[in-house]
Amino acid sequence: MSQDNHAKKEKTPETLTGELNSNKKYEPNMVMPGMPAGMGKMPQMPKQKTPEEVKAEFEALKKKLENVKKKILKKYKFTKFLSVLPGVGLPLFAEDEGMPVEVEKTNPTLLLMCIPEEQFKDINKIKDEVVKIIKESKENVWLLVKTEVDLWNYGLDSKFDLMDLVSGSFPLYDNGFLGALRLANIHKSLVLRKFEKYVATYAIGGSLVRGVADKDSDFDCIVIIDDTDVKRMPRLELLEKLRAMIHDYIREAMALAGVKNNLHVQVWLLTDFWQRVRDAEPVAFTFVRDGIPFYDRGTFIPWKLLLKMGKIKPSPEAVDMFMKSGEQTENLLKRRMIDAMIDIYYGVITPTQALMMLAGQAPPDPKGMVAEVKKILVEKEKLMSLADLKILEKAIKLFKDYEHGKLSEISGTELDKFKKEHDGYVKKMKEMRGKIEERMQEYEAERVQNEIFDLTKSVFGNKSRESIIKDFDSELVKKGKVPRRMLQVIRNVSEIKHKIKGKKKLSPTEMQKFTAEANELISVLTEYAQRKELVAIEKSLIQVKGKKGNGELMVTDKETFLVQSGKISKIVGKKLVDSNEEELREASKKAKDSLKVSLSGNVFSVLQKELGDFEIVL
């Protein structure tokens, strides 16, 4: 079976549901519904000519009319656009404009000049002047001067073929207005191509119709689909499918139109839109009042006439509904004002808790926060003023009143004042944070300094820091007992407080590096000090073996202890007296600082008497 015969046997969808589910493709040379007869893929391209031929003809014509365009724009700078209408539209415009038959037979070029509506009073004068300019060029041109309202009247008079020709005209100059018409018209044609039998209305609205659009404005349009034959598909599903397909055509239309302005399309089902019009729903009401149809099958234009005659009036139910909406808006506004107050409250409380944590305190509960902040930040640290404390107190009171039901609404003036106080408070919080961090750095630097130099004093004795650093270099670094880089670390520790005061504050990276190096130095010094203590203790302990038993001697400069099976005794003169763990511990501390030990004859006499014959194990 040939492709032609197969195509003939394909059934055309008979319902809107069938149209949605059909696979009907876009045929490049088909005539789109709503386009003038004789037009092909693009509204401005005659079917019998290729795009290249049309483009070449237009470029030649554009060159001929260049001087005409310049003179017109120089004299009438308010011009919205100048364009050449498609030749296939000559019979239609000749009939509409009342062009003499003999002029029509000369096949003139149709030049359309669009001017603002406020210039309508001078339209005849403008037309006469432009005709003179055209005659000077000696080109066969017929001039049409129109305002936006004249173009909108094409749609209101159901002259959609003329609107299509205007939208598809070749632009000589355009401030964005013609591009918007072209975009809407191409999108309309794409929608009609798919839903030819079901589009009830395609209309434009918004700033373009009101005459306030510029070259960067977005454009609004509405598509109303006749859904009266839909029975097998839920209405919501139908609407979502329609919206998805119709919105997909926007990108294609923008590419074909060659414009970057966005097209905002609202898709409505006929039954829904009619209900909205009947209830005078604002969006529908505004679109019917201001909208201009680009395509209509007898629904939109009658609505406009009924509205103009005052026949469309809202029902009592609709009035009640919109009145309730106003009341709800008032309540919603009050709720949002309270929500804003709560947000500001947390904007005061949270950074305050952060500062308290930075100051080394637990984050206070809002109930006792004022007292805690006053004690720490106002009185102790002297960072916060009483005026700032009052802002904190005010925030807590407002929130407490809201929680207890005393505060149900707040005025805009009060909220604005509270917001300004919050901004100043947060600014002060940032300043306080810098000061606290600076103090914390000083405190940390002092703590590290004291810890390190206390350790070095236990190794080198109670000397000045300069002397300790020299001994550290000569006794530990040069003798290979600690890594060489520790010398620079101990120098940095010695100078850190001066650096912080001079620089005001170290960066987090600098402080982290300093702390890591200082902790490593503390570990090195602690390990060395422990080794030294162990050696000193080992020197002061002497093992003694005798016939009557064994024991240990703890020898210091002034005292000697004997430990036998857990019993602690002290040798005083030639006697052995009872002692205890506390005395032994104190003696052990003294032994750590002593590098030499000595035994007197009295010690040996006491040991001989207590243990009998004995020997010393070293």
Image: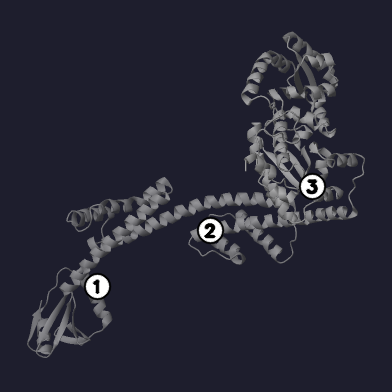
Query: Residue drawn 7% across and 87% down?
Result: 613
Question: CB of mark 3 within 8 Å of CB of mark 2?
Answer: no
Task: Return the residue at label 3.
Answer: 226
- The type of residue carrying mark 1 is Lys
What is the quadrant of residue 260 in the picture? top right
**Disc 1 from disc 3: Cα separation:** 103 Å
What is the quadrant of residue 539 in the picture? bottom left
Front-most of 467 and 394?
Answer: 394
Q: Which of label 3 and label 2 is nearer to you?
A: 3
- The type of residue carrying mark 2 is Ala
Q: Relative to 597, does residue 407 appear above or below in the rendering?
A: above
**Disc 2 from disc 1: Cα separation:** 45 Å
Badge 3 local density, few (<14 within 10 Å), some, or many (20+)? Answer: some
Return the mark for residue 354: 2
Q: Could you say whether the residue bearing mark 3 is in a helix, strand or loop? A: loop
Query: Residue drawn 27% across and 50% down?
Result: 488
Q: Could you say whether the residue bearing mark 1 is in a helix, strand or loop? A: helix
Front-most of 348 and 299?
Answer: 299
Badge 1 local density, few (<14 within 10 Å), some, or many (20+)? Answer: some
**Disc 3 from disc 2: Cα separation:** 62 Å
Task: Return the residue at label 1.
Answer: 589
What is the quadrant of residue 10 in the picture? top right
- The type of residue carrying mark 3 is Asp
Mark 2 and mark 1 lie on one chain; the one further toward the N terminus is: 2
Provide residue 376's location: percent of width, then percent of height.
53, 61
Q: Which of label 1 and label 3 is nearer to you?
A: 3
- Examine the rendering and report whether any part of residue 389 can be seen: no
